[in-house]
Amino acid sequence: MQVEHNVSLQALNSFGIAARAAALVRVRGAEDVRAVLADPELGPQPKFVLGAGSNIVLRGDVRPVVLKVEARGRRILDGGARHMLVEAAAGESWHDLVCWMLAQGLYGLENLALIPGTVGAAPVQNIGAYGLELQDRFDSLDAIDLRTGKLFTLNAAQCGFGYRDSVFKHALAGQALILRVRLALPKAWQPVLGYQDLERKMQETGIARPSARQVFDWVVAIRRAKLPDPAQIGSAGSFFKNPTVTAEQCQDIIGRDPKMVHYPMPDGSFKLAAGWLIDACGWRGKRMGNAGVHERQALVLINAGGPEQPATGGEVMTLARAIQTSVYERFGIRLEPEPVLV
Ligand code: EPU
């Protein structure tokens, strides 16, 4: 085990916030975690698990011991008659896994192409895009208990998946490190269409029965057109969750703002597009200090100062609070941050 002290995290979080970690250990497997737990100095301290840092906001320096997950490897397992089972280590890049699976003829993840981050982070927030969520392709995961060093396995029900949510944001927050994730891909592949942007692609191209490769290419093109290129502009993806409201609340807002984007949910409630609400409050392209709102997607807060003058965590949170206030004042809706606030 090698402990790095006073480490800059600027290159280790996709927002590019210039915070530091008091101590950082690179974790390649369970043994590295056990070595940390057995260490007289590090063992008793709180731990913070870091993947690719693409869904976090560092509000300041990180005091807990940072466990940077670097476990690698992926393999195909026997998934029985109906599924293909793929196991990937937590430190693998999510998008590389999607590309590798496509190349192997393993279909079913294409809607989740180009989502930044690691395989291990995917279940934490139950990543989702274009009509598909991780939970739709999830089999199980292996994790290590950060108090006892014991390995354990969770199935989908035990992960408590919800919209951008799981047990790792609640009961197991700060208490477990995911080592491996197993995904189950149906052998009888069907494209997941129906999301507005994909429907538009079908109409534009005249392709009614796209291949997995075609869906992948569409998703990549849609994301590139809307979301900032992580290599150019720092961000943590969507900064707020899309809020859910009652039918009455939804009708009330539509009465005043007929164009508001809303989606009916199976339970009779309505999901609203937070990006639309923020955009309607005039925030798109705006800047406060070195933090800004992306000019093509108001749901994405960006590091507008670039690597030279990076936004501080405080600036990002000040902007986020200003947005929350104006959306609340105009629509009566409280937006909830989507990334993990560290
Ligand atoms: N909209 C605006 N103005 C904006 C942004 C959006 O009017 O500035 C409108 C769009 O025109 C559209 C609606 O709002 O009618 C929804 O926008 P979009 O389809 O871009 O999706 P989203 O709801 O903003 C969610 C996810 C994204 C995911 C996309 C596609 C959340 C918090 N975000 O965004 O996930 O890629 O759907 O499925 O659920 C992420 O979690 O980091 C993320 C990028």
Image (spheres, helix red, strand yellow):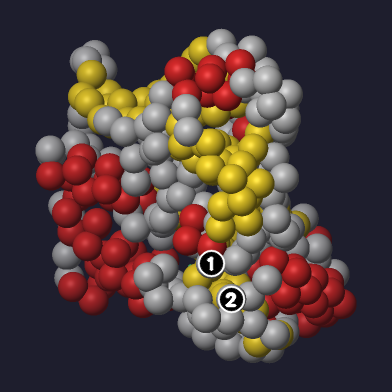
Residue 328 visible? yes
Residue 54 is situated, as x and y percent measured from the top left of the image, at 50, 55
Question: Crowding near pointer 1: few (<14 within 10 Å), some, many (20+)?
Answer: many
Indicate if the residue with disc 2 has its beta carbon within 8 Å of ligand 1. Answer: no
Residue 118 is situated, as x and y percent measured from the top left of the image, at 41, 44
**Residue 168, located in which quarter of the rendered image?**
top right
Question: Crowding near pointer 2: few (<14 within 10 Å), some, many (20+)?
Answer: many
User: Which of disc 2 and disc 1 is earlier in sequence?
Assistant: 1
Residue, disc 1: 16
Label 1 residue SS = loop
Residue 47 is situated, as x and y percent measured from the top left of the image, at 66, 34
Q: Amino acid at mark 1?
A: Gly
The structure residue drawn at horizontal position 65% and vertical position 68%, both measured from the top left corner, is 274
Of 210 and 128, the residue lying toward us: 128
Indicate if the residue with disc 1 has its beta carbon within 8 Å of ligand 1. Answer: no
Of 10 and 103, the residue lying toward us: 10
Residue 339 is situated, as x and y percent measured from the top left of the image, at 62, 54
The structure residue drawn at horizontal position 72% and vertical position 32%, both measured from the top left corner, is 46
Q: Total of numbered circles in the picture?
A: 2
Of 260 and 27, the residue lying toward us: 27
Residue, disc 2: 310
Question: Does residue 140 appear to the left or right of 97 in the view shown?
Answer: right
**Residue 337, located in which quarter of the rendered image?**
bottom right
Kindly check if marks 1 and 2 are in contact, taking CB atoms under 8 A apart as contact.
Answer: yes
Q: Amino acid at mark 2?
A: Pro
Residue 124 visible? no
The structure residue drawn at horizontal position 41% and vertical position 24%, both measured from the top left corner, is 29
Question: Does residue 296 appear to the left or right of 98 in the view shown?
Answer: right
The structure residue drawn at horizontal position 66% and vertical position 46%, both measured from the top left corner, is 22
Question: Does residue 93 appear to the left or right of 84 in the view shown?
Answer: right
